[in-house]
């Protein structure tokens, strides 16, 4: 038992030191992006807030105006339902330059519009490596999601770090189990802070008790983070051994060799999607539409307030951008067991599945993760100094 504990202590120490910087950055950035809309709205009211009053603009008119103002770009995401006091968001991707055969170089991919006044409020580049007020929240999101590393590298790199974090959660918890009797009474003391403790003992108590109180949430963040980065390559094949996954229209069609320019504009596609919604018996209005350049498929979402608050997706109708054919539909948390499992990691990781309390919990866990990393480094430094003095 003693040998096992020494090995576990050594593993926890060095894995923790290796992950400390990553977990500090991930924890702090995760705490911020749990409230992305609120913080971004506070930083950039000129982009995120709309005038007070009833909407006077047509969402599809904004699509036409954005593309007419800059023919080099194409709107691939459109807000179709307006929220009081909030601007409407549109994503833009570059078209192909016929002179070079390559995409145009746009300096923006988001456009914000005021549904009340009909004005275009501004543009920005989501994911730009910039830290001014307009780009601060998108940059923090990209740091959390990819560390600004290339996609081919960031996926497996961050996925493996998340896996090591998940394993270390179990190792760290096992080290809190007492060796002396009464075991339960001694273990319960590990959940508390010793009163009138010195600096070292207070740091140790914060590290140990903080890890225990947040353990389940930290493990959940580690596992969902692993899935969001490499789940398609690792978890999905395992799910297929015990259940079936309903293939999406994107998977059934496959990606084309190059960008697929839609034959039908969104204005022509929307009636097909609405008719399919009525046939399915859905009652929610169309809230957004996205177009996939890789497959030529429109996805029109019909979202209720409950779906929006939980961030679990929305009932969606898929329409062929070439001829308007209905290619299928999807509803969150329905279908096979595997279908439900793959719907959960994103809303769980962001805490939105639990509404505001869930986001507060995730933000608290993010701050706690940074605290655990910092206190772990402090404990290691102090122990190292003590060993050197003894030597």
Image (cartoon, helix red, strand yellow):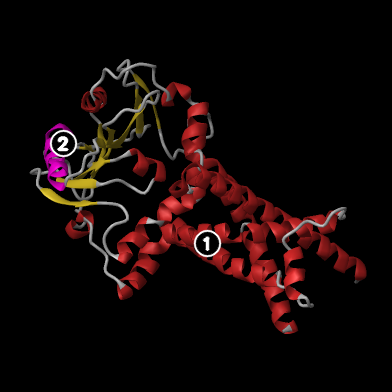
Residue at the spot 42% in from the left edge and 23% down from the top edge: 49
Q: Position of residue 333 (x, y in %)?
A: 32, 55
| Label 1 secondary element | helix
Identify the residue under disc 1: 162
Q: Position of residue 383 (x, y in %)?
A: 82, 64
Q: Position of residue 172 (x, y in %)?
A: 66, 68
Q: Main secondary structure of the magenta part?
A: helix
Q: How many marks?
A: 2
- Disc assigned to residue 336: none
The magenta stretch spans residue 278: yes
Q: Which residues are magenta?
A: 265-280
Residue at the spot 90% in from the left edge and 71% down from the top edge: 391
Left or right: where 346 falls relative to 78: right
- Disc assigned to residue 270: 2
Left or right: where 326 falls relative to 355: left
Spatial separation of the CA atoms under disc 2 and disc 1: 40 Å
Q: Quadrant of the N terminus?
A: bottom right
Q: Is residue 100 positioned above or below 169 on the image?
A: above
The magenta stretch spans residue 157: no
Kindly tell me whether residue 378 is visible in this rendering: no
Left or right: where 73 falls relative to 47: left
Query: Residue lying farthest right?
Result: 390
């Amino acid at each position: 038992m003693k040998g096992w504990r020494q090995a576990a202590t050594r593993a926890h120490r060095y894995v923790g030191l290796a992950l400390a910087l990553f977990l500090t950055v991930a924890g702090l950035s995760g705490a911020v992006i749990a409230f992305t809309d609120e913080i971004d709205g506070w930083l950039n009211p000129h982009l995120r807030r709309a005038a007070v009053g009833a909407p006077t603009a047509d969402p599809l008119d904004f699509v036409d105006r954005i593309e007419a103002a800059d023919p080099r770009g194409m709107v691939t995401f459109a807000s179709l339902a307006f929220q009081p006091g909030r601007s409407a968001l549109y994503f833009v991707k570059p078209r192909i330059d016929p002179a070079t055969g390559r995409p145009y170089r746009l300096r923006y991919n988001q456009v914000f519009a005021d549904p009340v006044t009909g004005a275009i409020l501004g543009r920005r580049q989501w994911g730009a490596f910039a830290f001014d007020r307009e780009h601060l929240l998108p940059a923090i999101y990209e740091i959390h999601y990819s560390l600004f590393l290339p996609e081919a590298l960031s996926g497996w790199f961050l996925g493996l770090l998340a896996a090591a974090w998940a394993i270390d959660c179990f190792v760290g918890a096992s080290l809190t189990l007492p060796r002396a009797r009464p075991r339960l009474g001694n273990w319960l003391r590990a959940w508390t802070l010793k009163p009138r403790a010195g600096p070292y003992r207070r740091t140790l108590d914060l590290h140990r008790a903080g890890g225990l109180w947040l353990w389940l949430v930290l493990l959940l963040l580690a596992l969902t983070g692993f899935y969001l980065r490499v789940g398609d390559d690792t978890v999905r094949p395992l799910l297929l051994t015990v259940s079936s996954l309903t293939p999406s229209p994107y998977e059934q069609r496959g990606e084309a060799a190059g960008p697929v320019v839609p034959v039908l504009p969104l204005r022509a596609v929307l009636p097909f999607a609405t008719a399919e919604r009525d046939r399915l018996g859905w009652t929610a209005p169309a809230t957004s539409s996205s177009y996939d350049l890789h497959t030529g498929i429109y996805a029109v979402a019909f979202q209720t307030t409950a779906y929006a608050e939980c961030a679990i997706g929305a009932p969606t109708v898929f329409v062929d951008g070439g001829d308007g054919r209905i290619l299928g539909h999807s509803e969150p948390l329905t279908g096979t067991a595997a279908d439900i499992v793959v719907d959960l990691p994103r809303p769980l990781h962001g805490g939105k599945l639990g509404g505001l309390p869930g986001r507060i919990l995730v933000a608290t866990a993010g701050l706690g993760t940074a605290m655990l990393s910092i206190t772990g480094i402090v404990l290691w430094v102090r122990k190292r100094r003590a060993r050197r003095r003894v030597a």
